[in-house]
Amino acid sequence: MAIYRQPRNGKDFWRTSSYRFTVASKDDASLIDLRTNIVKHNASVRSRARTYQTLTEYDKLYTVRLMARGPRRWHTKYKGPLIRYFKGQYMVPQSQKMLHGNADSNLNHRFAEEFDVYVHRSREMEDALQHEIDTGQTPGVQNKIKDLKNKIWKLEWQAKNDKLAGYGSN
């Protein structure tokens, strides 16, 4: 079951209003229910927007994000709660090996002991829906166009660098 945590200093000191609760696994019933409700809400907004060919200021799309929580370095993996989470742990040298390359900033889900659950507004999905309404291009077609533009950019960049490399060899 989900753990509903209170911030250390009370609700006024929350860093973000997006935080919902903490779960021990991705199979938690509360997380599954939340995701199901977000999917239903997003489907309803998309259906209404496509039907009326408009996206109002009240039509918001959301996404659920998980932030892994747990120890960041191998030597703290099975130690107590005092030196679990922070880069500058008490009496722990910085030379200790991390669980993965950027564990101090972003813990991989496979090393997590629990997950904080956040619900964010997805402006990217809203922009894609607005673009679909304006142009008639589905999100799949929009992604294909983005991929082709990216390939064109890579080819132009490669041609430019090949040309510059040719000047250096003279």
Image: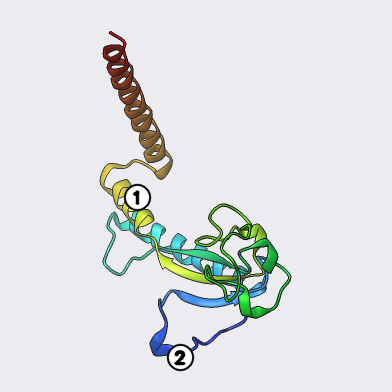
SS type, badge 2: loop
Identify the mark at residue 9; answer none if there is no mark: 2
62 sits left or right of 159 in the view? right
* Residue type for callout 2: Asn
How dense is the environment of label 2, judged by Cα within 10 Å: few (below 14), some, or many (20 and up)?
few
Is residue 1 visible to us here? no
Is residue 8 visible to us here? yes
Q: Residue at x 26, y 47 (%)?
A: 134
* Residue type for callout 1: Ala
SS type, badge 1: helix
Residue 6 at x, y = what percent?
A: 52, 87
Mark 2 vs mark 1, foreground winner is: 2
Q: Residue at x 62, y 75 (%)?
A: 83
Real-space Cα separation, disc 2 to disc 1, in angstroms? 39 Å
Q: Which residue is mark 1?
A: 128
Determine the residue located farthest toward the right in the rendered image.
78
Residue 40 at x, y = what percent?
A: 50, 65
Of residues 155 and 92, the one nearer the viewer is: 92
Using the image, determine if residue 17 lies above or below residue 12: above
When asked about the image quadrant of residue 35, the answer is bottom right
160 sits left or right of 141 in the view? left
In this picture the colour scheme is rainbow
Q: Earlier in the sequence, mark 2 or mark 1?
A: 2
